[in-house]
Image (cartoon, rainbow, N blue to C red):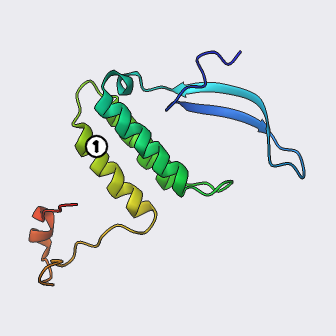
Amino acid sequence: PWRGVFDHLCLLAVELEAEEGRELHALRGARLLQHFPRVRTELARWYRALYAAELVEAAAQPGQAAPELFAALRGALESWDAPTCDAEAVLLTFEWRFLDALGLAPALVACASCGRRLDAARARTALFHP
């Protein structure tokens, strides 16, 4: 009954049954909501998508909702699934959103080298190099 539902990097709606005192839940149902077939068409997309999923898995706390992490990963998967995409730019955007969701994104209000504050006009055109 689960054929084609459980695959890497698919969005599912699952129904779990939890039993008191048990860590393992029983799977009662699953429905495929979204898959990303183009992600599998290029190794550059596939590797980056798996890396992003691993980051989210490592950062997410079991049993805790992480909507910002989920949104960052889903947005990246949707971008990698587009007919054309810059896989590296999508990854950098994901990493930025990932760090921001964890409260670790760099603040770009001043130059890291000299400390000079950036005015609003310069902040919009500031360059960032990871």
Q: Position of residue 115 (x, y in %)?
A: 15, 84
Residue most extreme to the bottom: 115
Residue type at numbered disc 1: Val
As drawn, 77 above or below 32: below
Locate residue 85 relative to residue 24 in the image: left or right: left
**Residue at image point 21% right, 76% down:** 109
**Residue at image point 13% right, 77% down:** 118
**Residue at image point 35% right, 40% down:** 48
**Residue at image point 48% right, 46% down:** 54
Which quadrant holds the C terminus? bottom left
Name the quadrant containing residue 3: top right
Other residues around mark 1 within 10 Å, as few (<14) / some (14–19) / many (≥20): many
Q: Position of residue 47 (x, y in %)?
A: 36, 36
Locate residue 108 relative to residue 127 in the image: left or right: right
Q: Position of residue 80 (x, y in %)?
A: 32, 33
Residue closer to the observer: 55 or 18:
55
* Residue at which label 1 appears: 90
For numbered disc 1, what is the local secondary structure?
Answer: helix
Residue closer to the observer: 95 or 50:
50
